Image (cartoon, rainbow, N blue to C red):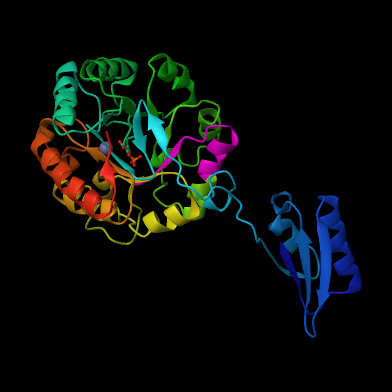
Amino acid sequence: MIIVMNNLATEEHIDNVLKKIKEKGLQGTVSKGTEKTVIGAVGDERLLDPELLESLPGVEQALRIVKPYKIVAREWHPKDSVIDIKGHLIGGDHIQIISGPCSVETPDQMEKSANAVKAAGVKLMRGGAFKPRTSPYSFQGSGFDGLDMFRQAADKAGLPIVTELLDVRHLDIFLEQKVDVIQIGTRSMQNFELLKEVGKINIPIILKRGMSATISEWLMAAEYIASGGNHNIIFCERGIRTFETYYRNVLDVTAIPVLKKETHLPVIIDPSHAGGKAWMVAALSRAGIAAGADGLLVEMHPSPCDAWCDADQAINPEELKKLMKELTAIAKILGRSISE
Ligand code: PEP
Ligand code: MN
């Protein structure tokens, strides 16, 4: 860490900063310039709080040199991490598409959805049993019955399941139901207690970006999971809030190369919650894969106009098939493949 002292800093102020640095087990070195004094603190700077140092008299600024995240950082793990979801790989050269309805509704809807997912060549299925809705009067998901319906339909089709965990109290049932990938939704990205709990298991986690979260907050949220021991984390960009009201959210395509630079973990996009309309899904999906995303989380319903949740953004089975063909071609140009 670099601590810049202000023009009024006295010897006593400098000594005080050095004392704090030493207390935390780091080593301080003073460099006196003509105008300012700069102190370098060497050691594990994660133990030093820049805000605490900035509150000391005579300190102008305290700047970190090392990134505050460690396990998820590419700095410490240069090679791409590849995550294995029941034999289906994601990351590195492997792209995975995850598709299915926004919410689990009925056994018939789930069976049709699973068949459509399979017919399109998609290997992983999504579906929400617990739905985080803006209004308490909207459909909240079919809960544990829905989870059971999902498990049965997916098992019949031989598809691993991806579903959102909203409440830490549901985790045991998720484990009993052998959920293959746990999704942490945009509203839960900074539910730190939830992050700590999913950090203790070894099931892959899809960590969606908070709708107003910075890249650094998102990486730190992933670090919460990783620091508990679970390194199977997949980042999912699902659109952020901006001043624009034409579409539901803005798909932050820029986040894809930035995240790929900062972390070794896979990065996918959710074109459905980004655009919020079915007709935008293909264009956003193509953009995401072209920009280097490792996959998609895309909403598909066997009959979109009958969907109980997010009907306007669900693509239909035929559209999913067409999209898969387009994405396969884009992946090939990039020397990658939509994996088995
Ligand atoms: C979802 O994927 O069904 C969902 C609720 O997404 P988000 O958390 O991105 O809003
Ligand atoms: Mn949805």
Residue 68 higher or lower than 169, as above or below? below
In the rendered image, residue 133, in percent from the top left (x then y), is placed at 32, 35
Please report the residue visible at 85 percent of the width from the left and 55 percent of the height from the top: 22
Does the magenta-highlighted stretch encompass residue 228?
Answer: yes
Name the foreground residue: 118 vs 77.
77
Q: Does residue 227 belong to the magenta stretch?
A: yes
Q: Is residue 12 above or below residue 230?
A: below
- Residue span colored magenta: 221-237
Residue 199 lies, in percent from the top left, at 54, 31
Figure quadrant of residue 310:
top left
Does residue 100 appear left or right of residue 9 in this picture?
Answer: left
- Residue occupying image coordinates x 64% and y 57%: 66
- Relative to 205, 156 lies left or right: left
Res. 243 in view: yes
User: Does residue 178 appear to the left or right of 58 in the view shown?
Assistant: left
Q: Residue furthest bottom?
A: 34
Q: Residue furthest front?
A: 335
Residue 279, compared with residue 197, is above or below; it is: below
Q: Give the percent coordinates (x, y) of residue 21.
A: 82, 57
Residue 257, given in percent of the width and then of the height, sits at 39, 57
> Which quarter of the rendered image does ligand 1 occupy?
top left
| Residue at 12 percent of width and 38 percent of height | 321
- How many callouts does the rendering have? 0
